[in-house]
Amino acid sequence: MINGENYIVVNYKANSIVKSIWVLWSAEDRFFSPRLKNSNARTVNREAASANIEVLFEARAPRLTASAGPSLRSERA
């Protein structure tokens, strides 16, 4: 039974880069997908659980600046 439990969730990208950290407070069974026959793995329905989710960290995409990309200017004089 998961009703009333709290979960700390860490989502990763490739190479173990943290994408987000969030807490699911006072979980309810209805927040999760049904269990598969041969597995205890379940996924969170973030829409159903939205009122109980607190995001602690969310990685931002790096911003590109004008100097970050290759130059299109000719180096010939």
Image: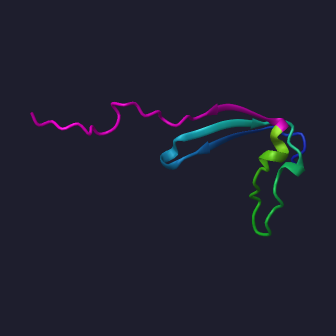
Among all residues in the image, which is located at the extreme bottom?
A: 37
* Res 23 seen here: yes
Circle count = 0
Confirm whether the magenta stretch covers residue 18.
no
- Which quadrant of the figure has residue 39? bottom right
Residue 70: x and y in percent read: 29, 39
41 is higher (above) or lower (below) than 65: below
Q: Residue at x 85, y 46 (%)?
A: 48
- Of residues 14 and 36, the one nearer the viewer is 14
| Residue at 65% over, 36% down | 21
Residue 42 pos. (x, y %): 77, 56
Residue at 26 percent of width and 40 percent of height: 72
Q: Quadrant of residue 10?
A: top right
**Residue 49: % across, % down:** 83, 43
Asked which colour scheme the image uses, the reply is: rainbow
Q: Which residues are magenta?
A: 51-77
Position of residue 34 relative to residue 51, above or below, is below
User: Does residue 59 show up magenta in the picture?
Assistant: yes
Q: Nearer the viewer, residue 39 or 55?
A: 55
Is residue 72 rendered to the left or right of residue 5? left
Q: Quadrant of the C terminus?
A: top left
Q: Is residue 66 left or right of residue 39?
A: left
Relative placement, left or right, of 38 versus 20 is: right
Q: Main secondary structure of the magenta part?
A: loop
Q: Is residue 54 above or below residue 12?
A: above
Please tell me in which quadrant of the rendered image residue 53 appears. Answer: top right
Q: Residue furthest left?
A: 77
